[in-house]
Image (tube, rainbow, N blue to C red):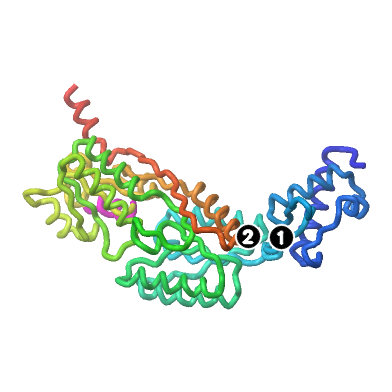
């Protein structure tokens, strides 16, 4: 018998590791798993400790039990030491994806998977498309257990391109979970699981904040053929502006185009608030405005999206929407595991809450109150 808690834990870890390796190595034919009595005899441990080990193996998805069948090895358990493919074009371009990827690496390795990230460091959208095409082929050839896929954007045919890539995975029955946004525009839904935030609602919150801060005309700065997530942000902002009876416009002027920004702000009906598709654009816009002598937020308020480091180190600090990267990564991995074990379940979409982070770039109204006092 085990004499100490420390001894129990050591024995537990050793037995768990050995049985886990046996299961993943395919040591038990036809899914049959040894009885509790056989395990007690084999390892020289108590029934209590055997049951604790079995319980942990069930949590890991490596064992299951059913009335009349006892304890057995699920059909998909042997796949748990295989590889997970990650196709995330936003890595390196948008800061929000880096912490999600780090979490996914940790979760994957903890569960016995080897995470494989596609190299998508191409400069142009067309080059990234070529790299994604290559990654899809490689993941199919390697028979990865499942794929996390962030849709390709900035292409005129992005929806068609994404549908084509995902169809290739579907044909060989490799499960796919989408990250960030769907491959079809809202309110449509594809046949794939999706983890992201409610971008429409987040855009609406940002718009309401600008309304409450006294904005009269709001412009949304975005790029052509951007992701459906950014389009949803735009539509949420538009709804908030229209509910308040305010003017709303969309502009594709680049944030570092001093002449274009001057033309936007020097018109008779110029916007007094500019919302950007993400924090990176907003950070660049703030630098352009500062160089032109435009005061933020006194002359124009500026907001971004994502709550990246850009937002904190901006001058002034940037009002934005926070994306909960830890929660997104956790849900993404859990849905991925469910999809691997249950490939025929209906597709699900999980949208996390994203909250407003007010900072100095929209503090105009508070400053006016202090000045009046």
* Viewer-closest of 191 and 197: 191
Per the picture, the main secondary structure of the magenta-coloured stretch is helix
Callout 2 touching callout 1 (CB < 8 Å): yes
**Secondary structure beneath label 1:** loop
The disc label shown at residue 74, or none = 1
In the image, residue 96 above or below residue 135: above
Distance from Cα at disc 2 to Cα at disc 1: 8 Å
In the image, residue 63 above or below residue 26: above
- Does 274 sit left or right of 277 as displayed? left
Residue 111 appears in the rendering? yes
Residue shown at 43%/65% (left/top)? 89
Mark 1, Cα crowd under 10 Å, few <14 / some 14-19 / many 20+, is: some
**Secondary structure beneath label 2:** helix
Residue extent of the magenta highlight: 279-288
- Does 8 sit left or right of 282 as displayed? right
The reply to whether the magenta stretch includes residue 43 is no
* Viewer-closest of 204 and 316: 204
The reply to whether the magenta stretch includes residue 281 is yes
| Residue highlighted by disc 2 | 341
Quick one: quadrant of the N terminus?
Answer: top right
Residue 301 point in image, percent of width and height? 22, 43
- The extreme front residue here reads 68
Residue shown at 58%/63% (left/top)? 343
Name which quarter of the figure residue 93 lies in: bottom left
């Amino acid at each position: 018998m085990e004499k100490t808690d420390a001894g129990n834990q050591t024995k537990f870890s050793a037995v768990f590791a050995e049985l886990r390796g046996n299961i993943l190595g395919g040591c038990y034919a036809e899914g049959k798993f040894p009885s509790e009595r056989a395990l007690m005899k084999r390892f020289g441990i108590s029934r209590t400790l055997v049951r604790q080990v079995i319980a942990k193996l069930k949590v890991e998805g490596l064992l299951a039990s059913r009335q009349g069948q006892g304890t057995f090895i699920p059909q998909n358990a042997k796949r748990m030491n295989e590889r997970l493919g990650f196709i995330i074009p936003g890595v390196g371009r948008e800061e929000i994806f880096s912490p999600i990827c780090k979490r996914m690496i940790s979760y994957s390795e903890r569960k016995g998977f080897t995470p494989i990230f596609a190299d998508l460091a191409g400069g142009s959208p067309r080059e990234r498309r070529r790299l994604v095409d290559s990654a899809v082929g490689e993941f199919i050839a390697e028979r990865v257990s499942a794929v996390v896929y962030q849709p390709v954007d900035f292409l005129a045919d992005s929806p068609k391109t994404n549908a084509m890539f995902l169809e290739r995975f579907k044909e060989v029955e490799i499960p796919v979970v989408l990250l960030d946004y769907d491959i079809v525009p809202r309110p449509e839904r594809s046949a794939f699981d999706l983890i992201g935030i409610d971008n429409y609602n987040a855009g609406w919150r940002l718009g309401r904040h600008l309304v409450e801060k006294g904005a009269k005309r709001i412009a949304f700065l975005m790029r052509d053929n951007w992701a459906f997530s950014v389009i949803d942000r735009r539509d949420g902002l538009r709804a908030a502006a229209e509910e308040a009876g305010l003017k709303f416009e969309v502009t594709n002027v680049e944030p570092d185009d001093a002449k274009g920004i001057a033309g936007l702000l020097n018109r008779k009906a110029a916007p007094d608030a500019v919302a950007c598709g993400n924090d990176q654009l907003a950070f660049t816009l703030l630098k352009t405005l500062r160089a032109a002598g435009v005061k933020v937020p006194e002359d124009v308020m500026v907001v971004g999206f994502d709550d990246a480091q850009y937002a904190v180190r901006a001058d002034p600090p940037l009002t934005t929407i926070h994306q909960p990267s830890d929660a997104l990564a956790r849900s993404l991995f859990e849905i991925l595991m469910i999809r691997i074990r249950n490939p025929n379940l209906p597709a699900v979409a999980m949208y996390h809450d994203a909250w407003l982070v007010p900072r100095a770039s929209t503090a105009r109204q508070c400053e006016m109150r202090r000045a009046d006092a």
